[in-house]
Amino acid sequence: DAGITQSPRHKVTETGTPVTLRCHQTENHRYMYWYRQDPGHGLRLIHYSYGVKDTDKGEVSDGYSVSRSKTEDFLLTLESATSSQTSVYFCAIRTAAGNTIYFGEGSWLTVV
Amino acid sequence: QQQVKQSPQSLIVQKGGISIINCAYENTAFDYFPWYQQFPGKGPALLIAIRPDVSEKKEGRFTISFNKSAKQFSLHIMDSQPGDSATYFCAASTGNQFYFGTGTSLTVIP
């Protein structure tokens, strides 16, 4: 357990509505990541953060934005959800000691 | 473009058998190669990892074999157990970026 909490864990939303997923960590890790997991695609990086207000895009960032106003919270926002964004979203942190990332329990999002 | 290619997509093994999952990469800048295990409804969990200066790493029944010249690495699960049934992901990283394979669904039959 890397002290990561994701919320909500499950959400069903309608196409065109905004959605925000929250990742909260308790151990002051500098690096935080958002991945999505889809069958046949594995885990793909959406955005990551390397400090407060410091973020960068990953390989599948279109349609997503992020914010990190505090070390412990990393928010992922879908401005206008689409059915293609139905997925499982995982937050991850990277420890300072090693080169490994640790994942949260996931947020299941369904866009109908 | 898939940075890390993983095979097979699914694998069925008898209890006590050896499970082998393979991964390949192209980017020679990758310097860390972890494997993750994921159970249904859970997040991926780090299983074992290796750096490219080592050809093999063993932890219990799990072994990573690494072939730097071929740019390939594999996970071997010895004496596979039904409790090993899960999805396994290989990954490769350089700096702050981690790239994952597409996953292998392992089923161990009692």
Image (tube, coloured by chain):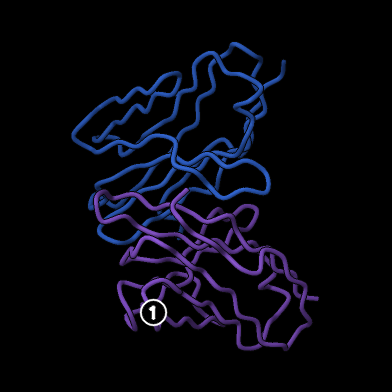
- Pinpoint residue B81: horizontal percent, then vertical percent: 61, 19
Task: Give the position of the N terminus of chain B as an image quadrant.
Answer: bottom left
Where on the picture, by quarter, is residue B51?
Answer: top left
Chain letter behind tag 1: A
Q: Amino acid at mark 1?
A: Lys
Task: Give the position of the C terminus of chain B as an image quadrant.
Answer: top right
Crowding near pointer 1: few (<14 within 10 Å), some, many (20+)? Answer: few
Would you say A90 lies left or right of B97 here?
right
User: Which chain is in blue here?
Assistant: B
Depth check: give the residue in front, B43 or B8: B43
Residue at label 1?
A70
Q: Residue at x 62, y 40 (%)?
A: B39
Where on the picture, by quarter, is residue B98?
Answer: bottom left
Task: Determine the residue located farthest toward the front in the rendered image.
Answer: A26
Q: Is residue B91 above or below residue B13?
A: below
Would you say A88 lies left or right of A51 here?
right
Q: Residue at x 49, y 22 (%)?
A: B77
- The colour applied to the residues of chain A in this rendering is purple
Q: Residue at x 37, y 60 (%)?
A: A27
Where on the picture, by quarter, is residue A111?
Answer: bottom right
- Pinpoint residue A68: horizontal percent, then vertical percent: 41, 80
Q: Is residue B41 above or below residue B76?
A: below
Q: Residue at x 46, y 56 (%)?
A: A3
Q: Is residue A64 above or below residue A27?
A: below
Would you say A69 lies left or right of B19 here?
left
- Pinpoint residue B20: horizontal percent, then vertical percent: 50, 25
Number of numbered discs visible in the structure rendering = 1
Q: Is residue B75 above or below residue A13?
A: above
- Pinpoint residue A108: horizontal percent, then vertical percent: 68, 63
Mark 1: secondary structure:
strand
